[in-house]
Amino acid sequence: MTRPSPFKITLKILAVTFLALGAFMGCGLAKPYPAISTFDVSPVESAPPLSRPVRPYVVMVTPLNVAAAYDTRKLIYKSQKGQLLEDFYNELIAPPGRLLADSLATYLDLKSPNAQFTRAHGQKGADFVLEGYLAEFLGDFSLTPPAARMTLAVTLNDVRRERVKIVLAKTYQVRVPVTGQGDKPAPSLIAALTQAFAQVLTEMESDLTESFNELQKARK
């Protein structure tokens, strides 16, 4: 019986090795990874009426400035040990500074009887500029029960004259419990953050209406 040459034995060993390596890599490539889920935190509102009275003011809403820890699309959690953690598989549909400013302008334009709210760039044609700083926007799981926390400071500036005047400056701070989280806390956290944002918008709309009414009285 003729023995195989050392060269043929080496080829067989290499062939078996490559087959095993290919199977291993194939299994690794086929491993499913969780899909990234995206969420919106904008409160749902009905369409504006077909006819509306003329509103005397125009307010330009700028993108919000955001604290560095929350300037990301990823959902942010505060752990029981007090660490801020990013959720790599659940995120907002847009960066929070732009997403919340767009939602804020849309909501206030729908609700305000005194002013039109726009996201147009530049101050040309605007009577007022609404600026904001998002200091907190997270799920705080160091609390019992866990809660969504939102802190938003806003300033309404009168830019009708060369010297800018502050009409309203207020910080809105809201905490909403996160309930029904189970083993997937992201949807519950989004629901709580949406509710927190809705509370901020409702209170802000009331404050802005009062400020504009005072301005109207001062003109008479």
Image (spheres, helix red, strand yellow):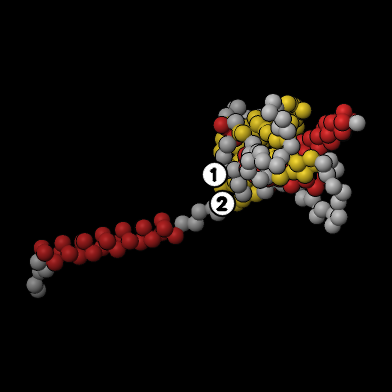
Which numbered dot is residue 132?
Answer: none
Of helix, strand and loop, which one carries label 1?
A: strand
Q: Position of residue 202 (x, y in %)?
A: 81, 38
Quadrant in the rendering for residue 99: top right
Q: Quadrant of the N terminus?
A: bottom left
Look at 62% across and 30% down and name the residue there. Answer: 80
Q: Pick whichever, 74 or 216, lies toward us.
A: 216
Q: Position of residue 98 (x, y in %)?
A: 63, 43
Look at 83% across and 34% down and name the residue there. Answer: 212
Q: Is residue 76 left or right of residue 150?
A: left
Q: Quadrant of the C terminus?
A: top right
Q: Pick whichever, 214 or 3, lies toward us.
A: 214
- Would you name the residue on which mark 1 appears? 88
Look at 84% across and 31% down and name the residue there. Answer: 215
Q: Position of residue 11 (x, y in %)?
A: 17, 64
Q: Are marks 2 and 1 in contact (CB under 8 Å)?
A: yes
What amino acid does circle 1 point to? Phe
The span from disc 2 to disc 1 (Cα, nearest Å) is: 8 Å
- Would you name the residue on which mark 2 appears? 36
Of helix, strand and loop, which one carries label 2?
A: loop
What amino acid does circle 2 point to? Ile
Q: Is residue 215 left or right of residue 192?
A: right
Residue 144 vertical placement versus 188 (above, below): above
Quadrant in the rendering for residue 49: bottom right
Q: Is residue 12 left or right of residue 112?
A: left
The first of marks 2 and 1 along the sequence is 2
Q: Pick whichever, 157 or 81, lies toward us.
A: 157
Look at 23% across and 64% down and name the residue there. Answer: 15
